[in-house]
Image (cartoon, rainbow, N blue to C red):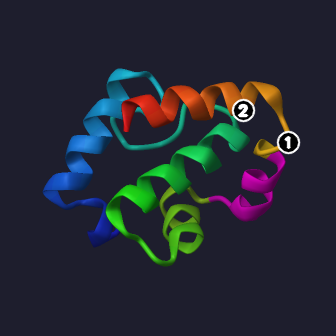
């Protein structure tokens, strides 16, 4: 896990998103690619991570998360998830 995602503040966020069923105990997403991109963006924003896509693409072994994020912003179900995410984080 990247150091920026292993701080005390980050671990508090991880516990919340695990409790919500969005990531597993290995911090891997259990939600869609678009929702995962929204989650990565929210966590990065909260923790002040500058290279969010690189950080989460490495952690989750994914590519093109920025494209997933842009797609999410055009999907109603992803926007509903974003509303829930903002309440939690």
Label 2, residues with CA under 10 Å away: few <14, some 14-19, many ≥20 = many
In the depicted structure, whether residue 53 falls above or below residue 86: below
Mark 1: secondary structure: loop
Q: Which region is colored magenta? A: 62-71
- Say which residue appears at 59% left-offset and 59% top-offset: 61
Q: Is mark 2 on a helix, strand or loop?
A: helix
Q: Residue reaching furthest bottom? A: 50
Is any atom of residue 1 visible in this view? no
Give the distance between the C-alpha atoms of the residues marked 1 and 2, in whole angstroms: 8 Å
| x 70%, y 59%: residue | 65
Residue 39 x/y as whole percent: 53, 45
- The numbered mark at residue 74 is 1
Percent of width and height locating residue 86: 47, 36
Image quadrant in which the N terminus is located: bottom left
Q: Which residue appears at 14% of the width and 55% of the height?
A: 8
Q: Do the residues labelled 1 and 2 touch (CB within 8 Å)?
A: yes
Image quarter for residue 80?
A: top right
- The picture places residue 46, in percent across and down from the top left corner, at 37, 56
- In the rendered image, which quarter contains the C terminus? top left
Q: Can residue 53 be seen in this view?
A: yes
Give the residue number, with chain letter if any, for mark 2: 78
Looking at the image, residue 63 sits to the left or right of residue 61; the answer is: right
- Taking the magenta stretch, the answer to whether it contains residue 66 is yes
**What type of secondary structure mainly makes up the magenta span?**
helix
């Amino acid at each position: 896990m990247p150091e920026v995602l292993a701080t005390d503040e980050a671990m508090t966020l991880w516990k919340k998103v695990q409790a919500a069923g969005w990531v597993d105990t290995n911090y891997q997403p259990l939600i869609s690619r678009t929702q995962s991109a929204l989650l990565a963006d929210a966590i990065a924003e909260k923790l002040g991570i500058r290279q969010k896509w690189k950080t989460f693409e490495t952690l989750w072994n994914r590519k093109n998360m920025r494209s997933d994020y842009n797609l999410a912003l055009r999907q109603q179900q992803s926007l509903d998830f974003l509303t829930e995410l903002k309440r939690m984080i």
